[in-house]
Amino acid sequence: MPHKWRVLIADDHAIVRQGLKLLIDSQSDMEVVGEAADGAAVLEQASVVKPDVVIMDVSMPRMNGLTATKTLKQRQPDVVIIALTRHEDDTYVEELLRAGAAGYVLKHSTPAHLLQALRAVASGGIYLDPAVTARVADGLLTAHAPPPEARIAKITDRESEVLRLVAIGHSNMEIAERLNISVKTVEVHKTSAMRKLGLNGRVEVIRYGVLQGWLYDT
């Protein structure tokens, strides 16, 4: 029997949790293994049910989704988190990505977008809701843009290959295994590419990946 992705749903509205559970349990490759109504409960549930993916509402009582994401990633680094929220503000996107979320889906998006996000992040990728993707890309070209000389810098094919895999969420170890090179070599290529392009940190690498069309190429 194929592996089913184990999903934990965190949302303070019971009707939302029920709707998500019905949607996810109707899929052959995923199942809901737990539910939580607030951030603190997410941490408790995750330690018990050991999910592959957590769908994390941002606005919840006791502990908000951002704090819960940061804490959960510290405790269970392998768990994958999708932020599910009504907030379209770029600040929410950036803060959730910095906290370790691999996906960002808006509540008014279609169920198909959420399922696409679940499959993308469960497979090691990153997913941003189409409604915010363009603005994330714009951010690289405006306030967060590297210097003009860096934007026209050329990176090697191998550096580009490594940076693409970083942008879609793969670890150095996974990239090394995929490309049949050492972890140290991965780090050298990643550091070199980021320096040439003027990129600082995960969020800017993701932005660059959006511009290159890498984001959904898992």
Image (tube, helix red, strand yellow):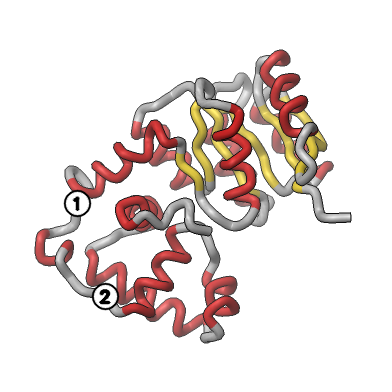
Amino acid under disc 2: Ile
Q: Quadrant of residue 8?
A: top right
How far is the residue under mark 2 from the one under mark 1?
17 Å
Determine the residue located farthest toward the right in the rendered image. 1
Q: Secondary structure under badge 1?
A: loop
Q: Residue at x 37, y 40 (%)?
A: 133
Q: Secondary structure under badge 2?
A: loop
Q: Residues within 10 Å of mark 1 (few under 14, many from 20)?
A: some
Q: Residue at x 56, y 85 (%)?
A: 180
Of residue 47 and residue 195, the one placed in the foreground of this image is 195
Query: How far across and how far down the image is residue 1, in percent?
Result: 89, 55
Query: How far across and how far down the image is residue 4, in percent?
Result: 80, 48
Q: Is residue 22 above or below residue 209?
A: above
Amino acid under disc 1: Ala
Q: Residues within 10 Å of mark 2 (few under 14, many from 20)?
A: some
State the mark number for residue 145: 1
Q: Residue at x 51, y 26 (%)?
A: 109
Of residue 72 and residue 7, the one placed in the foreground of this image is 7
On screen, residue 185 versus residue 82, left or right, reads left
Earlier-in-chain disc, 2 versus 1 = 1
State the mark number for residue 123: none
On screen, residue 61 versus residue 165, left or right, reads right
Of residue 104 and residue 113, the one placed in the foreground of this image is 113
- Which residue lies under the disc numbered 2? 155
Q: Is residue 77 above or below residue 16?
A: below
Q: Residue at x 53, y 47 (%)?
A: 102
Instruction: Between label 2 and label 1, give the one nearer the viewer.
Output: 2
Query: How far across and how far down the image is residue 91, in percent?
Result: 35, 34
Determine the residue located farthest toward the left in the rendered image. 148
Query: How far across and how far down the image is residue 127, in percent?
Result: 50, 45
Q: Is residue 17 above or below residue 179?
A: above
Q: Quadrant of residue 137?
A: top left
